[in-house]
Amino acid sequence: MKKQSKFISSSLSTLSVILILFVWQLYAIHVDNPFLMPTPTNVLKSLLILLGEGRTYFIILTTLVRLAVSVLAASIAGLILGLLAGVFYQVEAFLKPLVTTLRTLPVVSIIVVILILYGNVFSLYLISFLLLFPIIYQAELEGIKNIDQDLLDVLSLECNNCPFVVVRLVYFPLAMPYFKTAMIQSTGLAIKVLVVAEYLSQTQISIGRELYFNRINLEYANVFAWTIILILVAIIIEHYIQKYVKGLKK
């Protein structure tokens, strides 16, 4: 039954991709202008050329390093502060205005303000961090708050002077499902926001700059090709994040 469901899901996903390519081809024929709307064939040629260049992989790696640093920093800060806020209501009250502001501010506003204040290098890390931190923090906070209070009361009696043991054996494991969901959601958001920031700041050696450079030079086949690369990178990252988080859960 599971194999049949998996086969049906794969078939429907393949059919969906074929349908998108078909509609794309029809629209490209209708526009009849390869500069404005390249065909799937032209984009595939550009994609193969890009994948055959070592520079492409260096650009992807550079963007991924920025992403990894931002995600790691946001995860550490979110886990620690989310734990503290879940245990001490004073910490939650103190951080609430900041977290609410970061969650409600438009993404473009954050990007523009940070770029103005810090330039186009350090700002990329800070922008990604500020957008990821509230998601991970809130997930950890909710996970801690949803732990059964009776369990915590028993632990406080059994192990009153061993807070680190309680954190390691209770708080983190029971909050892990919330953290897992936050990681999957935030990583997908992070790479999109990071590339937008790279695009606006025209950061050297970045996927965002390649999109900008090819757009102003009317190389729309390359724009589509880099977009496909970005989609593939995001899918691969999400896949490995899911595997990593499942490993943490075990």
Image (spheres, rainbow, N blue to C red):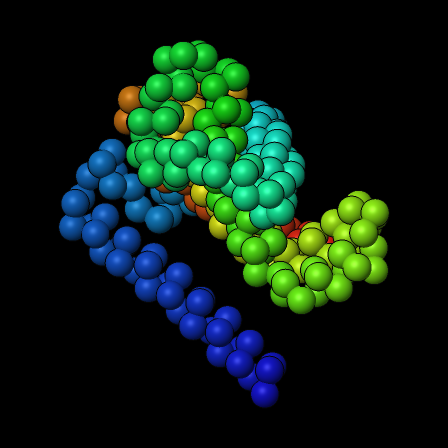
* Figure disc tally: 0
**Image quadrant for the N terminus?**
bottom right
Q: Taking 18 as reference, is 126 left or right?
A: right
- Name the residue located 60 percent from the left edge and 43 percent from the top edge: 88
Q: Nearer the viewer, residue 22 or 142?
A: 142
- Name the residue located 83 percent from the left edge and 60 percent from the top edge: 158
Vertical order, 5 against 137 (above or below): below
Q: Nearer the viewer, residue 139 or 69?
A: 139
Q: Is residue 133 visible?
A: yes
Measured from the top left, where is residue 196 in percent x and y? Answer: 39, 30
Measured from the top left, where is residue 116 in percent x and y? Answer: 37, 13
Measured from the top left, where is residue 164 in percent x and y? Answer: 80, 45
In terms of image quadrants, where is residue 53? top right
- Name the residue located 41 percent from the left edge and 34 percent from the top edge: 97
In terms of image quadrants, where is residue 117? top left
Q: Taking 203 as reference, is 35 left or right?
A: left
**Image quadrant for the C terminus?**
bottom right
Q: Residue lying farthest front?
A: 157
Vertical order, 114 against 140 (above or below): above
Q: Nearer the viewer, residue 120 or 173?
A: 173
Measured from the top left, where is residue 189 in percent x and y? Answer: 45, 43
Q: Taking 3 as reference, is 96 left or right?
A: left
